[in-house]
Structure formats: C-alpha cells, structure tokens
Amino acid sequence: MQVNDELIVNIEKFSNLGLGIAKVDGCVVFVKDTCPDDKVKIKITKVNKNYATAKIAEIITPSVHRATPFCPMQKVCGACQMQHIDYNYQLELKREIVQDAMRTIGNLDIKIPMPIQSPQTKAYRHKIQYPISQTKVSKKILAGYYKPQTHEIVNIKYCPIQPKICDDIIDFVRANAQLFKISGYDEKTHSGELRHVAIRTSAYSGENLVTLVINSQKISTNMKDFAKSIYENFEQVAGVCINFNIKKTNVILGNKTVCLFGKEFITEKILDKTFLIGTNTFFQVNPKSAENIFDYVKEYIQNNYPQATALDAYAGVSSFGICISDICKKVVSVEENKSSTELAHKIVEINNIKNIEIHNMDAAKFFQQEKRKFDVVILDPPRKGCSQLSLDEAIRLSKGSIVYVSCNPATLARDLKYLKTKGCKIKNLQPFDMFCHTYHIENVAIIEV
Ligand SMILES: C[S@@+](CC[C@H](N)C(=O)[O-])C[C@H]1O[C@@H](n2cnc3c(N)ncnc32)[C@H](O)[C@@H]1O
C-alpha cells in the first residue's frame, strides 16, 4: 500500500477518535467522514508502520446509518466528527467505544448499556472559546475553530451545536473589533491584542458571560470601549470580563480576570440547586445532560446509603456535593483550582447548604491527610484520570462505594483495571452523551470497595 493508492474498502468499525476503520491486507486504515457499513473508494494519504490513513474518494454504497450533516461547515471545521451518522447509531458507536476500551485497556468483561441521550442534541454546548486572529492585508478579524490538525482558523458564522446568541456575539466581535482599533492575535509573532473570545451561556436563564482574553497586562481604552459596546448591544449579555494572558502558550485563559461591565457570574440551575458560572471556574459544557448525571449519582446514593457521608473529589464548584447535599448527612469536597473553591463557597451560601465542607487542595494530598471514612467517594478527574496514589487513597477512604465519573474511556478503563486488582468490584458502568455529534463520551462507574 502506498500514498495515493485508490482502493475500494468496507468500513468495519469506528475508532475512539471518530474515524472509520477498514482493513487492507491485514493493515488498519483510518478513514475520516465514514460510517461502519459504508462501501467506499479511498485514497491513501499516509502509510505508517502499523496503520495507514486515507480520505474518501467516492461513497459507493452508503451505510444505512448515514445522515445528512445539519451544519454546512461540518467537514471544514472538524469539531463534530459524527454529524454524518444518525443520532441513535452515534449512541451505539459510542457504546462500542466504551466497550472496546474496557476490554482492550481494562481487560474487563463488563456489558456496557446504551448511553443515556442528551436532552438536547443541538444548541447544547454552553461554553465556547473562539481563537481570534486577523487577515494579513485588510486586518479583518477572524473568529472560529481551528481546522483539524492546524492552527488555521475556520471563520465560523453559524454553529448549530451552540446557542444562537453565541453566533450573534461572535458576529458582532468580527464586525466591530476593527472599528475600535482592536487587533487580532498572531501566535507566530505573539503580537496583536485579542487572543480569544469565551462565552458561557446559562441553559436556565439564557444569560451570557463574555470574556475577552487579551495579550496584555493592561486594558486599553479601546478595549474597554469595545467591551462596553458588547455589553450594551446584547440584552442577554449579563457581564463582560477581561482575562489577561501574555504567555506564549496554547492555554486559553490566564489566571487573572476582571469584570468590566455587568455581572462577574451567570446563574445556572441544576436539579433544584442554583449555580454560579464564572470565567475561570469549571462547569459542565452541556448542563441538561450533566443534570442527568447528577440525578443518576444522587439516586444511587439515596437508594444505597441513607444519610450518607460523601467525599466529592475533583469537585470544581462542588457540583456533585451540592446536588447530593439534601440526601447526605455530610459532604466534603476537594478541588485544586482556587477560583472554583472560592465560587463553591458562594454557591453553598446562595443555596443555604450547611453540611458541606470545601477544601482547596490537590486531591491526592488531601486524601493522604484525611482520617475520616466516607460511605461514597466521588472521583471526577480531568481526562488524564487518577494517579495510583489517588486510587489507593480513595479505596482507603471509602467504606462503601467509589463513584468514578470520567470523560475519557481509556483512562477510566486503566483506572478500573487498577481498582479491580486492589479487590474492588465494578458494579455498573453507564455512559451519558454530553457531547453529541463528537466522539466524546462521559461515563459513570459504580465501584464497590
Ligand atoms: C472534569 S472536572 C469536574 C468538576 C466537577 N466535578 C463538576 O462536575 O463540575 C475536573 C476538576 O478537577 C480539578 N482538578 C484537576 N486536577 C486536580 C487535582 N490534582 N486535585 C484536585 N482537583 C483537580 C479541575 O480543576 C476540575 O475542576
């Protein structure tokens, strides 16, 4: 097999990174924008030692699961790798991704049920972060996502997976930044003023928090006027903030944010609890699907541990802890991000919750110094999963269950395998679709220690 070879293949499977998989003479070939059961003519684009990549030259017989993408930019943008597949089959493919990870990485024989659907499959994404740059000659502002595997911005005017107001705000930025003499960022020369525009939208109130990420330590008068114009132009914009990021880095937000106009936080509602969302604090991107997860975990604890004591680790703004506080005797939460724990205190106060204790610390360090034991330990780590030290300590601190919430099936499988070697029993694993039309899938594992 060589680059530019044209071959006719059947797509047999779907990879964990959203690519169709075909086999040619025993070699795996990854083909973008395909669906299992497609018969396609492909053109080989790269040949590596163990696998090759290819693009579609022609669809010969489409899979019955194909759907017409509802976004005209789907192929160029690359963020929704599964829009060409009907939603129910997307769920089945995600189920298989989790099943495969458990079997191959975790060596675990668990039957994975179908993911619980997202209540909304369009306009579900309530957090966006658009990189900003400008055209070389006319200095026109560009705002959008990077083309896959590049740092070239796709100037996105309409994105159906986010609320429409986000498109309107970004359009306004694009059309007006130049009038205020705002320059777009150039990452090669580390010059230009505006690096990113971040928007958080509340699914409950429709409020928006707009953050302009600037490549400066000072706010220019022009930037201030521009921020004011955004605030004044949109009734649904509850606040406009400036985040300072002068580092040469791919990390979007700097540590410092100031609110210039309106409110510093927007209000969200999950179950019967009120939450605040700020620029530098974690909150689930799809609040309606997150609500299903919080409800699921709450129900499990309520049914198994009346008057439970719970440890909510990797807690963000203590979202799990706050949602389960009514059915628990005591909740202790731990989170390393200072802004999130500070906001958690405010949220606890707003909801008049008296039985939560909040700690701002690295989870593993906190675990090591903790003497109390808990009926349930909730772990909701970032994509890289937990360290073995964290897992050992979670076992030590739990006298009943560990509830492991994960956005990465591979690291979840690795960590479940480890927990099993330590004598834990994996009772249940339920996927939830938080990121429709992408290959991402959230999971909740219930583990008995
Ligand atoms: C996937 S988020 C979950 C947040 C929260 N459970 C929720 O549902 O909103 C992971 C959180 O872990 C925090 N985190 C990352 N590493 C950590 C560590 N070593 N110790 C404590 N918290 C950590 C992050 O700041 C982030 O808030």
Image (cartoon, grey):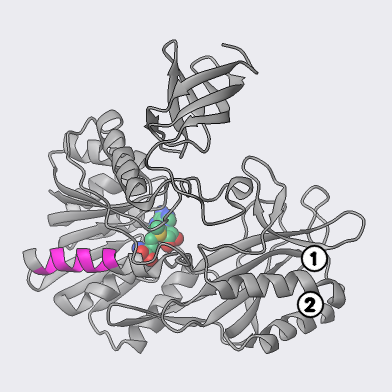
Q: Residue furthest right?
A: 137
First along the sequence among labels 2 and 1: 1
Return the x and y of residue 261 as percentages of the image width and height: 65, 87
Q: Is residue 149 left or right of residue 347?
A: right
Q: Which residue is at a point 18% across and 74% down the rendered structure image?
A: 330
Q: Which residue is at a point 56% across and 56% down the rendered structure image?
A: 71
Q: Is any atom of residue 334 visible in this view?
A: no
Q: Is residue 427 left or right of residue 276?
A: left
Q: Is residue 144 left or right of residue 115?
A: right
Q: Is residue 397 left or right of residue 115?
A: left
Classify the position of the N terminus by image quarter.
top right
User: Magenta region: which residues?
Assistant: 292-302
Return the x and y of residue 344 as percentages of the image width and height: 39, 76
Taking depth in this image into account, of 62 and 4 the one nearest to the observer is 62
Q: Is any atom of residue 22 visible in this view?
A: yes
Q: Are marks 2 and 1 in contact (CB under 8 Å)?
A: yes
Taking depth in this image into account, of 322 and 266 the one nearest to the observer is 266
Q: In the rendered view, would you say 444 is above or below 240?
A: above
Asked where in the image residue 353 lies, by quadrant, the reply is bottom left
Asked where in the image residue 377 lies, by quadrant, the reply is bottom left
Q: In the rendered view, would you say 238 is above or below 134?
A: below
The circle on residue 223 is 2
Label 2 packing within 10 angstroms: few (<14), some (14-19), many (20+): many
